Amino acid sequence: MNRLERLRQVIAAAQRHPVYAERLKGLDAQGFTPQHLAQIPPMTRQEWIVYIQANPRPPQGAALMHLTPSPALGWMPEYLSAEDVEYQAQALAGQMRRLGVAGKRALVTFGYHIFAGGWLFHEALQRAGAMVLPHGPGDAERIAQLQQQYGFEILVCNPSFAMKIARAGGRFELLLAGGEPFTSVPGYREQLEAAIGGVAVDAYGTSELGVVAGEGLEKKGLVEIPEMAIIEVLDPETLEPTPDGEKGELVVTALSRTLMPMIRFRTGDLAIAQRVDGQTVLPRGVIGRTDLMVKVKGVKLYPTELAPLLMAFGLDPRSGGAQVVVDRGEGGTDRLYLRLKAAAVPPGLEDALRRATGLKFDGLEADPALEGPPLVDKRFG
């Protein structure tokens, strides 16, 4: 599979698509290289939504359709041609082979109906030489029983459900996890590996893009899957590449999509990048969302990046469980506070927050009745 040749095929297809035609006008698809991507303005999900609202029917040549929930549309469709489907399966099979799945038995618990998750792993595992049971979600006790009865060595699952399966007695040599914060939560992998009795590795993808990054067995972070994507990490304000070790937004060019191209697609997901041997590596996985960025004390803070750390301290930051408050102190200096929906502030949390964000919090407060938005900025009236 020639990565450069595939990129040129994707660019040529995108030039014929109404969403990208103007963006890619004048580009030479046959001479295109990854370095030319910087010439293309990134694309947002909202731009795709506007197009789909005006063109609600499946496009000509669609062979497969998946859906994902969308507040604007109800459901956001994803379309693939027959060639896209085959390319995607073969591309992900390369990642599965690198994980040593050949000859193993795999049990997939991601959904198969409407959503893309189950199909993505299922087809790749089969092509990589594994036997697959398309179980789908639910019933941890039955999954544990099936594992014991048939000797499944591989579990494909989100990490929280994998823990339930482990508690029900399921044991696996390898867990392929995704769909939730996992390796970004300190200590979570170790707990899960102890529970399932094997190795747990992370994967990252979206419905629009497919699975575009995954860990190897050495567990050194999410690495872009070269057959599936070109991943950039950009400053969400300037849209310039972030230096290694700095936070930014994941912007992805999918190599598996020609019918519904995704060129420099802004995911809204937050990560820290390293460039290693020409590939993008996310050593801490995906650590939050860029939607609620605030600049405080000269440092960009994304409230959602605190979620994995808070989870490691036994707190649930979802559904109003945490609130960042920024205010002005004496002399106009920024003051930063964190309110938690909890009975008490866990010991050691303040130091952990400083190490993770590079910021000193001026106060941490526990309030079991906490309500309100995740970010309150009082500096601007």
Image (cartoon, rainbow, N blue to C red):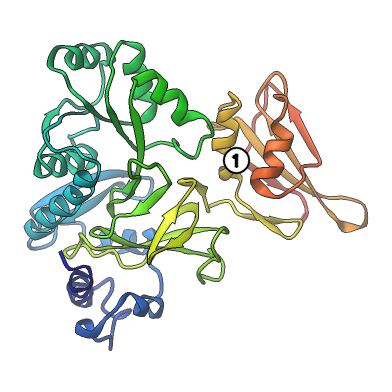
Type of residue at label 1?
Leu
Query: In the image, what residue occupies the spot 63% across and 34% down?
Result: 322
| Whole-percent x, y for residue 9 in the image | 17, 73
| Residue at image mark 1 | 306
Query: In the image, what residue occupies the spot 37% across and 58% down?
Result: 45
Up the image or down, 108 lies above or below 98; here it is above
Up the image or down, 158 lies above or below 205; here it is above
| Whole-percent x, y for residue 19 in the image | 28, 71
Q: For label 1, count other residues whose C-alpha is less than 10 Å away and answer few (under 14), some (14-19) or many (20+).
A: some
Up the image or down, 129 lies above or below 225; here it is above
User: What quarter of the picture does the C terminus occupy?
Assistant: bottom right
Up the image or down, 143 lies above or below 233; here it is above
Residue nearest the viewer, comparing 328 with 140: 140
In the image: residue 317, left or right of residue 177: right
Occupied quadrant, residue 138: top left
Query: In the image, what residue occupies the spot 16% across and 63% down?
Result: 259
Helix, strand or loop at mark 1: helix
Q: Is residue 99 visible?
A: yes
User: What quarter of the picture does the N terminus occupy?
Assistant: bottom left
Occupied quadrant, residue 343: top right
Name the outermost residue toward the right: 331
In the image: residue 124, left or right of residue 354: left
In the image: residue 338, left or right of residue 130: right
| Whole-percent x, y for residue 164 in the image | 36, 17
